[in-house]
Image (tube, rainbow, N blue to C red):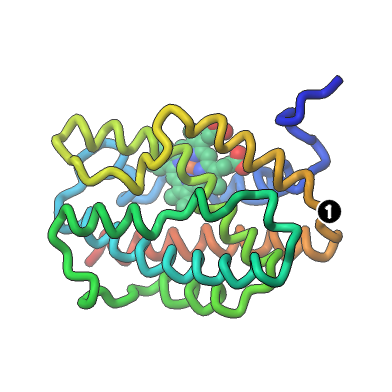
Amino acid sequence: MTSPAAPNPDGIMARLKAGTAAQHAVAESKPLEAALIEGSIGRAQYEKYLSQRWLIHRELEAATDRALRTDNRLTSLGLPSLYQTKNLEADLAHLQSNLESIRPLPGATNLIQEIQKAAPSTLMGIYYVFEGSKNGARYISKSLAKGGQTALRYLDPHGEQQRPIWMKFKADMDAISWTPAEQDQMVKAAQATFDAISSLDDAIHSG
Ligand code: HEM
């Protein structure tokens, strides 16, 4: 018998992982990501990073709320328990940021437009990238904590539960019957999201 969380080699999650492996390698090697994982990012840049993520998550989660009302296949994913907008707001309040002064940088603008018009499959391709990024973010939060950073709710929202939550997300995504066309849209959206994040990382790093 297979366990419910066993990886499905033919499922959408395996396709998403394989279809974005090259983009993950690019994203991971960006100078901003290196500064995050080394714990050497400055306060101003960290604040900028969280601010841009706040703009994105706000749209992503509003769009997800809308999709949950129209596509009941998404219900099983328990998405609202994974939301990050409030965590970002807590971190930004901790850093004494003014949310009203935040403006989108290149990368964020395009992504926000894509989110606003996304069908559920496209939306879940975008969602996948941010949900998956919690895996590496947990390592980043440990480095930043060593440097004294305490605004870490976004980077480590689930603590020791990160692994089981990710395994559940994967199993639930694989259990949904996505059409072949939806699967193609999802992979394309995930690839475009990685590209947007990489260009956003560059804009933050050079700014
Ligand atoms: C310092 C930078 C990064 C490091 C060290 C890192 C590290 C990791 C690690 C170790 C995993 C594997 C988790 C596992 O399967 O156990 C992972 C997965 C993932 N990361 Fe990153 N990551 C980084 C940056 C990013 C960025 C910038 C994004 C996108 C915003 C991202 C998106 C993802 C996604 C979507 C997955 C899931 C892959 C899958 O389908 O299994 N990562 N990352």
Toward the top, the furthest residue is 1
Q: Secondary structure beneath disc 1?
A: loop
For the question of whether residue 27 can be seen, the reply is: no
Q: Position of residue 81 (x, y in %)?
A: 51, 49
Q: Residues within 10 Å of mark 1 (few under 14, many from 20)?
A: few
Q: Is residue 172 above or below residue 89?
A: above
For the question of whether residue 173 can be seen, the reply is: yes
Q: Position of residue 133 (x, y in %)?
A: 48, 46
How many numbered tags mark residues here?
Answer: 1
Pick the front one: 60 or 77: 77
Q: Position of residue 46 (x, y in %)?
A: 23, 53
The yes-or-no answer for disc 1 within 8 Å of ligand 1 is no
* Left or right side of 5 for 22: left
What residue is pinned by disc 1?
A: 177
Residue at (56% x, 67% y) in the render: 65
Pick the front one: 203 or 72: 72
Q: Is residue 40 above or below residue 142?
A: below
Q: Amino acid at mark 1?
A: Ser
Residue at (71% x, 47% y) in the render: 173
Which of the 4 image quadrants contains residue 21?
Answer: top right
* Left or right side of 147 for 13: right
The quadrant in which the C terminus is found is bottom left
* Left or right side of 200 for 5: right
The quadrant in which the N terminus is found is top right
* Left or right side of 23 for 4: right
Residue at (74% x, 28% y) in the render: 6
Which of the 4 image quadrants contains residue 39?
Answer: top left
Residue at (19% x, 41% y) in the render: 150
Q: Position of residue 75 (x, y in %)?
A: 68, 55
Which of the 4 image quadrants contains residue 95?
Answer: bottom left
